[in-house]
Amino acid sequence: MKIQIPKGTFDILPVSPEEPWQLSALWQFVEETVSQVARDYHYQEIRTPIYERTELFDRGVGETSDVSKEMFTFEDKGGRSLSLRPEGTASVMRSFIEHNLAQQKSVHKFYYMGPMFRYERPQLGRYRQFHHFGVEVIGVAGPAQDAEVIDLLYQIYTRLGLKNLKVKINTVGDLESRSLYKAALIKYFTPHLSALSSDSKIRFEKNPLRILDSKDPHDKILVAEAPSILAHLSDEAKTHFQQVCNLLDQIQVPYEIDDKIVRGLDYYNKTVFEVISEDLGAQNTIGGGGRYDGLLASLGGPDLPGVGFATGLERVLQVMLAQKTPFATKPGPFIYFIPLGEEARDKCFTLATLCRHHKIAAEVDLLAKKVAVGLQNAARSNATYCALIGSDELHSGHIQLKNLETRQTTDTDFDHLITHLQGLSCQLPIFKHLTGSGASSPL
Ligand code: HAM
């Protein structure tokens, strides 16, 4: 029996994926672009394990958060409870504490990328294994750091060519604002308690702010009329939020204030934000983040402020696809050898190996039986040049290189092939337009 891929996961393929966004060349383009933007902002890469001790996430993402209920948790052979990481922030904090990084310098700016795992009901844009690109800044409490992080996220989308995005920002205040606001929410929801969904009844007990994040249609009607956090802010939280907005205005990052954003994780304080694309279905949030000043201390680390975001790469790719965004792919082999006959095959193999040893990307069609098929394969592989080698070439030592795009040919011989190829102009990335009907099938 055929073994199938686990539910909620997908493969990323070099050719003909079921969904165009599952093409590896596209992933490489996005991964390289987003990392480059982060490096332009002077962020450095951090890599943490795919799994951590479960208590890190219990304490890190918060027990009332949706994420903590969706973890892939297992016991190792030593009886320790481990969980596949559902997000990156808690792991970065753990690593920061474990390696005493606070002693190295006062500001740390990290970026990371990789698979995350949440046991959710799979649907379009929502998977059980998905990919985050995220950043975390530790050490700066002021509003300029929030604005920088939001700008970095927006710049990533801009650099990728995404359009029609909405940046929504809010503040969940500081402790003082939140306790005032919680009291106001309890007062507001108490007479409606019986009408709330069962999930929101639990949220009412544990953390009423989380009711604002409910997806239940009846809850949403009540939430629309709920009091606003913006009316319950302490002076400090209000000033911080105003300054973030002013700075975003100054650097011309477009945004909307949405006082109902609370985010799905418990660690936030002050600024929170999400980026929405109207070109996606129900799962239209492509990125989100915020400030989490108490998190590091709550995990046993120094009391340093933090702010960051994560963007879901699947959803970013799906927006690119929906908007037919051009993307650059790596070119195929610089030279593609097509042997005619067995003797020529060995020669082509040797020449291709020589090219590769000189850092010239080369391919040889070891299966080619007919010239036409060889040429077709060369074109399909996006090769820049191809060379047909048969008995004439073997005999004379001369070969002709054909540029597959311009159709022009140049002559050389076996002994000078490498210097000849090195002299030919560098390859430029190929800009492609995404095709296909877009993402459709849930996994
Ligand atoms: P999050 O909002 O849970 O934040 O996840 C960030 C993004 O990951 C979402 O906006 C969405 O695009 C994507 N995402 C989440 N779950 C799935 C899924 N099941 N399938 C596909 N994509 C998904 C965080 O995780 C925080 N750690 C962000 C952060 C960093 N806050 C501060 N620093």
Image (cartoon, helix red, strand yellow):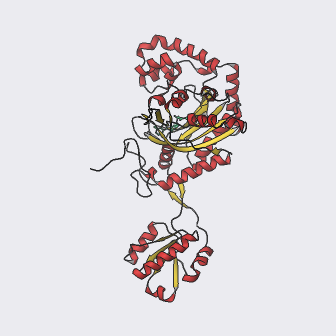
Seen from this angle, which residue lies furthest right? 105
Q: Is residue 413 among what the camera can see?
A: no
Q: In this view, does 223 lie above or below 247?
A: above
Q: Where's residue 36, x and y in %?
A: 62, 50
Viewer-side residue, 15 vs 355: 355
Q: Where's residue 129, x and y in %?
A: 45, 41
Q: Where's residue 375, x and y in %?
A: 43, 74
Q: In this view, does 208 lie above or below 288?
A: above
Residue positioned 54% across, 61% down in the render:
330
Residue 281 image-quadrant placement: top left
Residue positioned 48% across, 16% down in the render:
205
Q: Where's residue 320, x and y in %?
A: 51, 48
Residue positioned 49% across, 66% down in the render:
382
Viewer-side residue, 49 vs 338: 49
298 left or right of 367?
right
23 left or right of 274?
left
Q: In this view, does 66 lie above or below 401?
A: above
Seen from this angle, which residue lies furthest front? 78
Q: In this view, does 29 lie above or below 299?
A: below
